[in-house]
Image: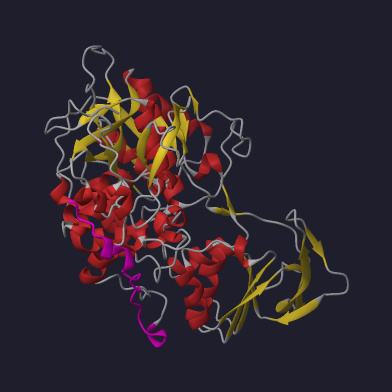
Amino acid sequence: MDTSSMKSEPFVSRDIIDRKWVEVNVPCQTACPIQTDIPGYIEAIIHKDYEQAYMINRLDNVFPGVLGRVCHRPCEPECRHGREGLGEPVQICFLKRSAADFGMEGLAPDITPNGKKICVIGAGPAGLTAANDLALLGYSVTVIEQYEEPGGMMRYGIPQFRLPADIVQKDIKSITDLGVDIRCNTRIDSWEELDKIKADYDAVVVSGGCMLPTKFGLPGMEAEGVFWGLDFMMQANRNELEVKPQKTVVIGGGFTALDCARTSYRIGAEATTIAYRRTIDYMQFSGEEELHHLHEESIELLLQVSPLEVISENGKVTGIKLIKNEIGANGKMTPVEDSEFVIEADTVILAIGQTAEELEGVDVEDKSVPEAKGNLFLAGDFRNGSGTVIGACADGRKIGRRVHEMLSGERFEEIVEISEVQIGSLPRTREDDFIPPEKMPTIPVSARDKTAEVETGLAMSQAHNEAHRCYLCHYNFQIDLDRCIYCMKCIDVMPVDCIHLAKDISIGDDGSINYARTKNWEEVEAIAIDNDECIRCGNCLNACPVGCISVSKYHYKTVIQPVQITRNRSDAGVEVNA
């Protein structure tokens, strides 16, 4: 991308080449379902500007405090710092929490009402994200919630020792501060009620989530002491759980299964076992530290086993019969003949997933169902099936945009802002590559009850150190070929293999820039910096004798394209997702 015309204001690019550059070179943001500006907020932490770090998260993913604790972290496996020979990935999720812990402040946007009304049914992450985004666009938004408090799975499906209720409340307050009205203890029970709401509002978003357990038949499961996983967690979070287990077996390997097991430990079980049909590679957990917490809390993992029957006496659970599985190369499970065994238990928790309530006329299990029908829209887990908090937020944003497009005629588009960077202002040094990962502080095992948060958050000094590990992949290093004298000094000082002699340069249909490496000077067409390998140490900048290497900062975001498009202005648009 030619950035020679850039002034102090960012250059707005709609070029597929620049969008592809971000996709390839900022893999953490690409992996994030809601496209959070991860290097942007981490750089703010490097500069100790926690308010800015929080605001980036607040505008991008709406729930910084929540997601800084319970996000399933699809970004971290993609972090370049975790590649072979480069150490462990940056702890992106922990830093998101630090942004909320140290920088949370209220939004004070100047919102112009547009006179249109939206009703959102369900105050979970998808519904609240849609409500947030639509409120920022000037809509009057009412959210209807069946439970006593808003938050959905964030409030009732996740234990407080992982996600305290006050953190959920703080993140939701930043939405109600925008004028969003949340009406709790209100349930829509009939199609007639829904029809009335559709008539009263310009659009209705149904985002009821997946608050029902996925049920299956298991002999003996009618015995006293058998629970569905989500029922168990909701009773615990609503202080309605009366069971006093001594020996608990949890069937499942997802987030709810682990939460049930850790809750069982906290309410006094002497022994708790998680029985899962596959290997640990298929389990869902927030991070390796959660497996460490299971070990600390003496929770046993029993892998490659499936339940056959709940054993009971006089109507009460006494154990569960399991069978061992073999898993083939294709992932197919096969029961091992004559491998049945029984575990003693007085409580069996079946945590094998959640499903949505049925909406008359809409089969939410049918993936061909459109996301909208007239002014009725479906969002989040209610439409897609049980998923993650960040995934639900992303779908809520998607549907919120569809609502706005229908009611306004405006469209959303992806752009890349490209900013000049003064070479002397780069916040990274080569020494930052060798900073070890920070360890999340935790409370002692003896203090772990139903509500005490286990992970206490990084100290500010720890967050600052962890942020310095980030490669800041949104920085694009480029060589001006008209000024380059091919002296090779940049190649001589590179600590990793990121600068190449290039030939056969071409641009793919998807915007990718392709070339072949060569050592034959007669074939050289350019010296190319591979930003996907570059560690942003700046050695090449200092070594170049003619100053032909420059740095630009790339920022992907989505803007509104107005109905009346002015063709001679490339920067038209109103920022929505900063």
Magenta stretch mostly in which secondary structure? Answer: loop
Kindly identify the residue that appears in the image at 44 percent across and 52 percent down: 389
Farthest-out residue, right: 338
The answer to whether residue 338 is visible is yes
Q: How is the image coloured?
A: secondary structure
Q: Nearer the viewer, residue 202 or 386?
A: 386
In this picture, residue 128 sits left or right of residue 286: left
Q: x, y percentage for residue 202?
A: 35, 25
Q: What stretch is highlighted in magenta?
A: 426-447
Q: x, y percentage for residue 350?
A: 64, 65
Kindly identify the residue that appears in the image at 22 percent across and 50 percent down: 543
Report which quarter residue 455 is drawn in.
bottom left
Whether 163 is among the magenta residues is no
Q: x, y percentage for residue 4?
A: 19, 27
In this picture, residue 387 sits left or right of residue 205: right
Q: How many labels does the image show?
A: 0
Image quadrant where one finds the C terminus:
top left
The answer to whether residue 351 is visible is no
Image quadrant where one finds the N terminus:
top left
Kindly identify the residue that appears in the image at 28 percent across and 32 percent down: 481
Task: Give the answer, above or below, for where 232 lies relative to 22.
Answer: below
In this picture, residue 558 sits left or right of residue 84: left
Q: Which of 198 and 347 is in front in this view?
A: 347
Report which quarter residue 3 is drawn in.
top left
Q: x, y percentage for residue 168?
A: 33, 58
Q: Which of 143 and 296 is in front in this view?
A: 296
Task: Give the answer, above or below, for where 49 lies relative to 464.
Answer: above
